[in-house]
Image: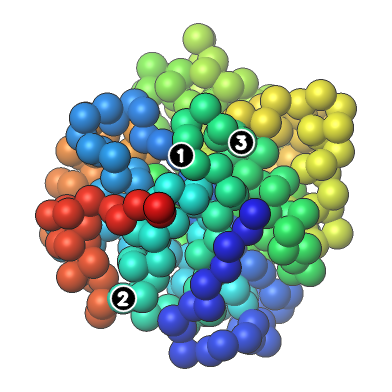
Amino acid sequence: MLGVQMGHGTETSPREPGEGGRAVRALVLAAGWGTRLAALARGRPKALLPLGRRTCLDVVVDRLDAVPQLVALDVLTNDAFAPAFHAWAGERQTRAPLRIHSDGTRRLEERLGAVGDLAHYLERVQPRESLLVMGGDNACDFDLAPFARLGARAPAVAVHDLGDPALVSLYASVELAADGRVLALVEKDPAPPTTRAALAIYALPAGQLGLVPRYLAEGGSPDNLGSLAEWLVARGLLHGLELTGTWVDIGTPAEYARARRLFGARGRRAGAASGAARLQARGPERTP
């Protein structure tokens, strides 16, 4: 099942790409259940946890919507959280058309995994544009336009310098060649040789979207995007681009507190505040 809601942007159909050339579609993966946040989430979608008077998803969507090449902005969640995302979308203003999709799952035990959700989306939507994929819990202030341009040419992963190898071990270590090719990428590397980490921000050219079902057909794990990235590296296909700025992966209570400090006082788009406040007070609506 892939439920769809038309967006609330100023357009009702995909636009022509802006400056920078090839059209890009964005997908925000937000079907996770926030198990690592335990009682903090209280049954709310992790991406809709408040950061001040807006949500993490508002931060993510603002960064994606600023990409000039963007022609469509899709958010993928699950059936249980879909009503909350529809309510959030009803109060958003975006430049690119915004749509909410569901992967059809209603319980944690049914989850498809990040790659599984990506494959589900590709099968149902059949996008013709290059695809920019971002985890809904990745609060950042990156300029994503250069990354989108790279991803229109080659499979790509966003890279960020965390400043400490110990922090990199929580994510994925990455080593880049001078031409930007990823030489090595190791998920949860116990001894990272670098302070650079691969983030849950990926891109695939329109002509290479078929790599995702091919990876799964060859026995790849559907759980983690990093496993797909390792598979791409083994075939010499993945490129990386280092992005500078502020980034927080809201995966633990400590990181959520840090995201609130770093992003809670920043500006917001019109329409985001009341949704965050309402979700904080009530939690998400549930499907019958």
Three-letter amino acid code at disc 2? Glu
* Residue 265 vertical placement versus 261 (above, below): below
In terms of depth relative to the viewer, which is nearer, 151 or 24? 24
Q: Which residue is mark 3?
A: 112
Q: Is residue 130 left or right of residue 61?
A: right
CA separation in Å, label 3 and label 2: 28 Å
Q: Mark 1 or 3 closer to N-term?
A: 1
Q: Which residue is mark 1?
A: 32
Q: Is residue 43 left or right of residue 27?
A: left
Q: Tag 2's secondary structure? A: loop
Residue at x-position 70% and y-position 25%: 221
Residue 137 image point, x, y percent? 39, 45
Residue 71: quarter of image: bottom right
Here the colouring is rainbow
Q: Which residue is mark 2?
A: 91
Question: Which quadrant holds the N terminus?
Answer: bottom right
Q: How many marks?
A: 3
Residue 195 image point, x, y percent? 45, 27
Look at the image and tell me whether residue 248 can be seen: no
Label 2 crowd bin: few (<14), some (14–19), many (20+), radius 10 Å:
some
Q: Mark 2 or 1 closer to N-term?
A: 1
Residue at x-position 36% and y-position 75%: 90
Three-letter amino acid code at disc 1? Gly
Q: Is residue 106 left or right of residue 213?
A: left
Residue 169 image point, x, y percent? 46, 18
Label 3 crowd bin: few (<14), some (14–19), many (20+), radius 10 Å:
many
Three-letter amino acid code at disc 3? Leu
Q: Mark 3 or 2 closer to N-term?
A: 2
